[in-house]
Image (cartoon, helix red, strand yellow):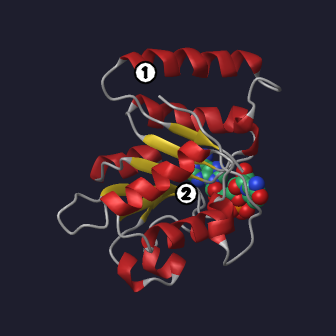
Amino acid sequence: MAIGMSYGTAKPGAVSECTQTPNATFFFISIAATLAYSSPLMKKIKVAQFGLGPIGVESLRLAASKPWADIVGAVDIDPAKVGRQLSEVTGLRSLRGRIVHGSLGELLGTETPEVIFHTAVSRFKAAFEQLEPMARKGINVVSSCEELVFPQLREPALARRLDRFVERKARASSAPVLIPGL
Ligand SMILES: NC(=O)c1ccc[n+]([C@@H]2O[C@H](COP(=O)([O-])OP(=O)(O)OC[C@H]3O[C@@H](n4cnc5c(N)ncnc54)[C@H](O)[C@@H]3O)[C@@H](O)[C@H]2O)c1
């Protein structure tokens, strides 16, 4: 399992700024993934969005513009969003047929995302409860949770738990990748 960071200033309509990063590894992974998955012969990465506030919607729009991404659905607990088509939520016709599920369990009942873009909460404590089930399923996660940058600061016990979990998974064959950042 690898841990990286991404930094940026979130502005509506300028999601690419959210993915700017000082971390060269993340940059090269992005470039490599774009090149590798641009070929029509290559399998696309199944992507889901967790949290559909302004940041999540822009994250989804950006992901939908990538040739390597196959958007399989989204999760949000807001009853006003659950059940809606992602084409409605984003204004992108290409996402017609993909829907907002009310929980991760519901999404995983119908889809098998390989990567989840997590844009739901700022606090690590809340994020932990959402991310742990994703990591347990071997799903890679890119999160906008601010406190995930240095979770030891406010939640040392939970951070140690995540560390131990990450180390255990890293010894397994299908270790998920968690990328925390802003
Ligand atoms: N670094 C930055 O510049 C920056 C800026 C803005 C936001 N952020 C981060 O991105 C996150 C998202 O930002 P936003 O403005 O879109 O937030 P928001 O609060 O407007 O939207 C969050 C969405 O997540 C959903 N959600 C909350 N808890 C959930 C759960 N348990 N399961 C499923 N869905 C859930 C909410 O219903 C909502 O639709 C923030 O919490 C923050 O951590 C970072």
Nearer-the-camera pick, 76 or 93? 93
View quadrant of ligand 1: bottom right
The answer as to whether callout 2 falls within 8 Å of ligand 1 is: yes
Sequence-wise, which precedes: disc 1 or disc 2?
Answer: 2
The residue type indicated by label 2 comes to Asp
Q: Residues within 10 Å of mark 2 (few under 14, many from 20)?
A: many
Residue projecting furthest to the right:
154
Side of 153 relative to 41 (left or right): right
Instruction: Point out which mark residue 1 bears.
Output: none
Instruction: Point out which mark residue 170 bears.
Output: 1
Counting from the top left corner in percent of width and height, residue 152 is at: 76, 23
The relative height of residue 134 versus residue 118 in the rendered view (above or below) is above
Counting from the top left corner in percent of width and height, residue 30 is at: 48, 55
- Whether residue 28 is visible, yes or no, is yes
Instruction: Point out which mark residue 76 bears.
Output: 2
Q: Residue at x 17, y 64 (%)?
A: 41
The relative height of residue 151 versus residue 97 in the rendered view (above or below) is above
**Label 2: element kind:** loop
Q: Quadrant of residue 17?
A: bottom right
Counting from the top left corner in percent of width and height, residue 4 is at: 60, 39
Nearer-the-camera pick, 181 or 165? 181
Nearer-the-camera pick, 97 or 79? 97
- Whether residue 102 is visible, yes or no, is no
Counting from the top left corner in percent of width and height, residue 26 is at: 55, 47
**Label 1: element kind:** helix
Side of 15 relative to 142 (left or right): right
The residue type indicated by label 1 comes to Ala
Q: Residue at x 74, y 65 (%)?
A: 10
